[in-house]
Amino acid sequence: MSQRKLAKPTDQRMALLRGQVTELLWHGKIETTYDRAKEVQKMAEKLLTAAIESYKDTVNAVETRKRPGKKGGVEEYKVELVNDGPKKLAARRRIMRVVYDVPEVMKENESKTSFRERTEHIRHPLVEKIFNEYAPKYDARAGELGQKGGYTRVLKLGFRRGDSAEMAIIELV
C-alpha cells in the first residue's frame, strides 16, 4: 500500500499528519490540502476503529486502602475501581502513540475551581474524548446502519489562491 510523500521527509511528514489527526479528533473538522486530508483520513479511521472495537473492555476491581483513623489508629476501607481491560489498554496505548496530548480548555464563564474539579481525574483529554464520546457514538451508528467505517468525510473546496493547491475539508461524520 503506497503512501503519499507530501514533499516532506518521513519524520516531518509523520509529525505533520500526527498534528492534523490530533486537531481533527479534538475539533471535529479541519481545512487542509486534499492529499493531506486523504492521509489524515486513513490514520483517523484506524484510530477510531481501534477505540470502537475495545471501548467496552473494562475490568472491575476492589482495592483495600488505608487512612489514618480516629484515636491514632489505621482505618481500612474498600474502593471499587473500573480499570481498562487488556484490549482497551492496548488500543489506548496505540492511540496515545499517534496523537499529541491536548490540554483541556476552560469553558466560558467557568470558574477556576469548577475547572479543576471537572478536569481533576482527566490525564489525557483527547484520548478520553475518543473513548467516551466518539466510540459509543460510532458503535451505535454501526449498529443502526449495519456498516463499520466511514467515520470521516472529505469535501473538496477548490484550488487555493497563490499556489493552486487543491483544498479540502475533512470532518468527522
Image (cartoon, rainbow, N blue to C red):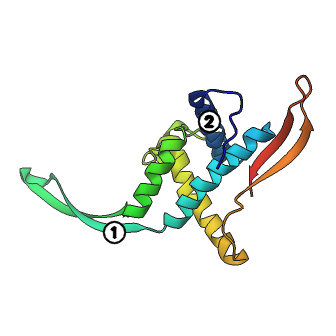
Residue nearest the viewer, comparing 12 with 81 = 12
107 vs 8: above or below: below
Residue 130: image quadrant is bottom right
| Residue 119 place in picture, x, y as percent | 48, 45
**Tags 1 and 2 in contact by the CB under 8 Å rule?**
no
C-alpha separation, residue under disc 1 versus residue under disc 2: 34 Å
The residue drawn where x is 63% and y is 45% is: 26
Give the label on residue 73, or none: none
110 vs 47: above or below: above
Q: Residues within 10 Å of mark 2 (few under 14, many from 20)?
A: some
Secondary structure at badge 1 equals strand
The residue drawn where x is 59% and y is 55% is: 46
The answer to whether residue 118 shows anywhere in this view is no
Question: Of the residues shown, which amino acid type is indicated by label 1?
Answer: Asn
162 vs 28: above or below: above
Residue nearest the viewer, comparing 93 with 129 = 93
Residue 23: image quadrant is top right
| Residue lying at the far front of the rendered structure | 1
| Residue lying at the far top of the rendered structure | 162
11 vs 147: above or below: above
The residue drawn where x is 59% and y is 31% is: 10
Residue nearest the viewer, comparing 40 with 136 = 40
For disc 2, the marked residue is 19
Residue nearest the viewer, comparing 37 with 30 = 37
For disc 1, the marked residue is 60
